[in-house]
Image (tube, grey):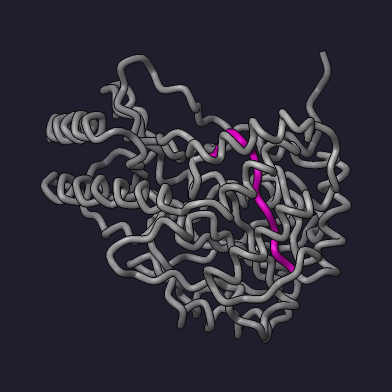
Amino acid sequence: MLTISEMIGRIKGSERSKVTTSPSPGASNLSKGEPDFPTPAHIQDAAYQAMKNNFTHYVSSYGDEELREAICFSLKRDYGVERKPANILVTAGGIAGINAIVATYVNPGDEVLMPDPGYSAYGECVNLFGGKVIYFPLSDTFHLDFQELEKRISRKSKMIFLCNPSNPTGIIWREEEIRALGRIVLDHNLLLIVDEVYHKLVYGGVKHFSICQIDALRERVILLDSFSKTYAMTGWRVGYLLAEKRMVEDLELFHKTMMICVNSVAQKACVAALTGPQECVQEMVAEYDRRRKFIYGALKEIQRISVFPCEGAFYFFPRFENKMTSREMTDYLARKKIMVRSGTEFGRKGEKHIRISFTSRMDSLKEGMERLRDALNELG
């Protein structure tokens, strides 16, 4: 029997690798990190039209030119930022972008800093390519703790990963935090990767500040984005990286080796997503907001649960009071037909936390919260 490579061995057995995307029959699914809405009709229609036009062959490994231009259009519309198609690499979803970044710039033994708790895929990719993950704890309110970060920067430090709005905490880091982080990046000659895949999913009047709005950081920043969350296109697998032209050329080498190019039909659908009507996004965000308010109110009513408001994305990261670990709590709730994610999947600071998503219909969320309340009450 063949043995797995050392590379795969580095990630085998991690909490993330054990997560299943298929909930048990009859379970309330509060774990899924994807929209439950259909992809908007005008986006689907654009894909169909692309197929009718026989746009079904290889395209540039950098991405379809029309899509890259549409991405630049959206950056100008949303942030007033001027970029050119040469600054864009279209990737096979956000995950392929993460892998391309790590494979391109991280050597075995290099250190990559990331928040704890933080999105688990970053660490998986770093481990896969032989880098060393260095976690820096967030504050008690899940905001950036710059003293803790600077204590962990060494001569081996290569880059910092950040997800804003945050998966799993639902926190949005403010403009002053992002600017302060940028100064640290410049002082220590680091590369900063900011994952902004949830940038349109913001609530309660909190403003999202994009890293691309800081022109002084252009040589030190890669912005990662995706169509998956904003436009309910998780299965279409299209994302992109925004960086300086030289970095885009470096990143394209790995991505081309792995993918040749991203699905051509899906790229035309993404053009329609960016340049077409945006009311569909507003409608989805309004429904997420309605669910968000319900979940927050329901969690506040459950004894032995404490929780911060969700400001962005579609997650809560409540803390529970019980002797169980997060992994044990997740397994216990699964037996009670409630699917959540363990807080420790996202780092050690996630202990005693679970991640709850509100990407299901309201009736399903209500049933899930009733089950959660009853299951925790049974523990006494």
Q: Which image quadrant for residue 332?
A: top left
67 lies left or right of 140: right
Is 58 inside the magenta-drawn segment?
no
Is 239 inside the magenta-drawn segment?
yes
The x and y percentages for residue 379 are: 17, 32
Q: Which image quadrant for residue 69?
A: bottom right
The image shows residue 128, relative to residue 66, as above or below, that is above
Q: Residue at x 49, y 36 (%)?
A: 41
The residue stretch that appears in magenta = 233-243
293 lies left or right of 46: left
Q: Which image quadrant for residue 201?
A: bottom left
The image shows residue 7, relative to residue 253, as above or below, that is above
Quarter of the image with the N terminus in it: top right
The x and y percentages for residue 349 are: 42, 56
Q: Residue at x 75, y 77 (%)?
A: 219
Q: Nearer the viewer, residue 348 or 25?
A: 25
Q: Nearer the viewer, residue 111 or 173?
A: 173
306 lies left or right of 178: left
